[in-house]
Amino acid sequence: MAYTDWMISGPKNASCNCNYGCPCEFRAIPTNDVCEGLEAHRIDEGWFGEVHLDGIIIGARYRWPGPVHEGKGTVQGFISQHASEEQRNALFTIFDGNEQEPTTAFSIYGSTIET
């Protein structure tokens, strides 16, 4: 299978409801029974094939009813309103994780998302 060359770079902020170090990322039980988090990422430099992604801000809200590795997660994504349809489609493809290389954080976490 041929993959589209892509890259995103820029500052990312994330937070979750667990204790420092986020046990959920290490196959442990969430601190507060459920795992909930938010993140935002400003793409200072990025592309997906020929589509430039510079200047777009993306974010997501996550929730798992238990440990992340047990799945059944829910995610709601956000993309800057100034992004074009082509840019949004490129970002959806990257974040979906199913159409790109299977070893990115997007595909690993994506495999735990149900909704």
Image (cartoon, helix red, strand yellow):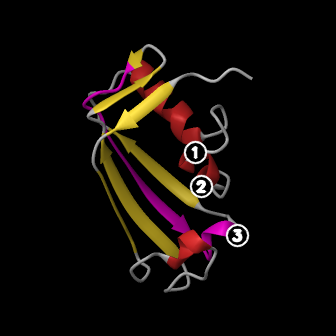
Q: Amino acid at mark 1?
A: Thr
The residue beneath circle 3 is: 70
Looking at the figure, which quarter contains the C terminus?
bottom right
Q: Amino acid at mark 2?
A: Tyr
Q: Residues within 10 Å of mark 1 (few under 14, many from 20)?
A: few
Magenta segment boundaries in residue numbering:
52-69
On whether residue 58 falls in the magenta region, the answer is: yes
Residue situated in front as seen by the camera: 106 or 58 = 106
Outermost residue on the right side: it is 1
The residue beneath circle 2 is: 109
Q: Which mark is residue 55?
A: none
Q: Residues within 10 Å of mark 3 (few under 14, many from 20)?
A: few
Q: Nearer the viewer, mark 3 or mark 1?
A: 1
Residue 59 lies, in percent from the top left, at 36, 49
Residue displayed at 67% across by 68% down: 69
Tell me how far mark 3 sits from mark 1, CA to CA: 19 Å
Q: Nearer the viewer, mark 1 or mark 2?
A: 1
Among the 4 quarters of the image, the one containing residue 45? top left
Q: Which mark is residue 104?
A: 1
Among the 4 quarters of the image, the one containing residue 1? top right
Q: Amino acid at mark 3?
A: Glu
Secondary structure beneath label 2: helix
Q: Is residue 37 above or below residue 42?
A: below
Residue displayed at 63% across by 52% down: 108
